[in-house]
Amino acid sequence: MEASITAMPKVLTTAFDGAVRLWDAEAGEELGRLGEGLDEAAHHTHVNALAIDTDHHRVYSGDAEGVVWSWRWESSGEDGASDFRPERAIQPPKLQGRAITSLAMRPKLRVTGASNKGSEVTRRRNQLLIYSQGGFLILYDMSTRTEVVQYRGAVCKNSRLPATFSPDGRLVLAGGEDGSVGIWDAWSGDSLHHVFSEVRFTGPIMDISWNPRQHCVALAACGGNFPVLVGYARKNTAVENGPAGAFGSQQPEIDELDLQEEKVIEAREKIDRSRRVKLKLEEFKKMRGGAGSGGGTSVAEG
């Protein structure tokens, strides 16, 4: 269901059978399952989400009951699934019985003026973004086992939807079951108005991917002839030198996400063409059906 490449030449995958498997990335061979040999399986239902914290050598897996397992990687020399040892299970009270659909580690944060050696230092916070059905989107501190922020307004009922951070860790994006995209300030949890507010797919948003270097983000939806829409950051001197823009005062250098208008127009035209073709096909089938019943013959659709 979900795959992630670790810092090692290995691949971790989750599955409906509740297993988290480790694979040899080059040979494609299964090396084992996390928690193999335990008296009781870690997950008792299908595992939907996976997140890897390379700095702290941990893997987090989330299942359909709202449980997140923490696995610690310790090299034993065998280079297999036994290197991943279960630490603990975490279940925030509000997520109990709710399927987790996405997990994401908060990226490293750059703090200005916090070091004598330079103007910037990099700080890693052991915080996990958890998205679950029922529309619960929270930032959870894995060290203190406490909820830090709740991002309200996410629309997730039955689908497996994505949630992620911007590369700098200051924005949270989540796909909506109604085809919308939500953006929040990662620090305060405030919902932010943005250019994607004007764009709505007719199906759930199934994937959100940031480019860590080019300051752009791609969106993909489920079903239909939906193209991948790409938004990119564009400098705006009025915002840069004046009041803060739509993303708040804490990140003035992120001026705006400007969705490429030609992509939106192209997407809408494709959807309209698809609908027109579908209507014409339905009209044609009705005409054929009417002619068949009137003439004593029938038309079989295969």
Image: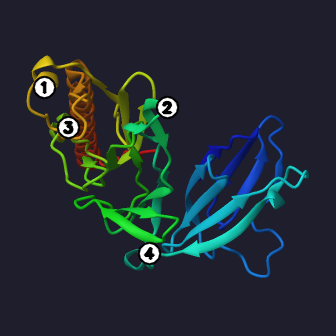
- What whole-number distance in Å separates the C-alpha atoms at marks 2 and 3? 45 Å
Is any atom of residue 236 visible in this view? yes
Question: How many numbered circles does the render carry?
Answer: 4
Residue marked by disc 1 = 239
Residue 255 occupies quadrant: top left
* Residue sitting at x 67%, y 70%: 87
The tag earlier along the polypeptide, 3 or 4, is 4
In front: label 2 or label 1? 2
Residue 263 occupies quadrant: top left
Graded by Cα atoms within 10 Å as few (under 14), some (14 to 19) or many (20 or more), the crowding at tag 4 reads some
* Residue sitting at x 46%, y 57%: 127
The scheme the figure's colours follow is: rainbow
Report if the CB atoms under discs 2 and 4 are less than 8 Å apart.
no
**Which amino acid type is shown beneath numbered disc 2?**
Lys
**Which amino acid type is shown beneath numbered disc 3?**
Val
Graded by Cα atoms within 10 Å as few (under 14), some (14 to 19) or many (20 or more), the crowding at tag 1 reads some
| Residue reaching furthest to the right | 78
Where in the figure is residue 231, as x and y percent of width and height? 29, 27
Residue marked by disc 4 = 92
In front: label 1 or label 4? 1
* Residue sitting at x 82%, y 53%: 75
- What whole-number distance in Å separates the C-alpha atoms at marks 3 and 4? 32 Å
Where in the figure is residue 246, as x and y percent of width and height? 15, 38
The tag earlier along the polypeptide, 3 or 1, is 3
Q: Where is 214 relative to 280, above or below?
A: above
Report if the CB atoms under discs 3 and 1 are less than 8 Å apart.
no
Residue marked by disc 2 = 117
**Which amino acid type is shown beneath numbered disc 1?**
Val
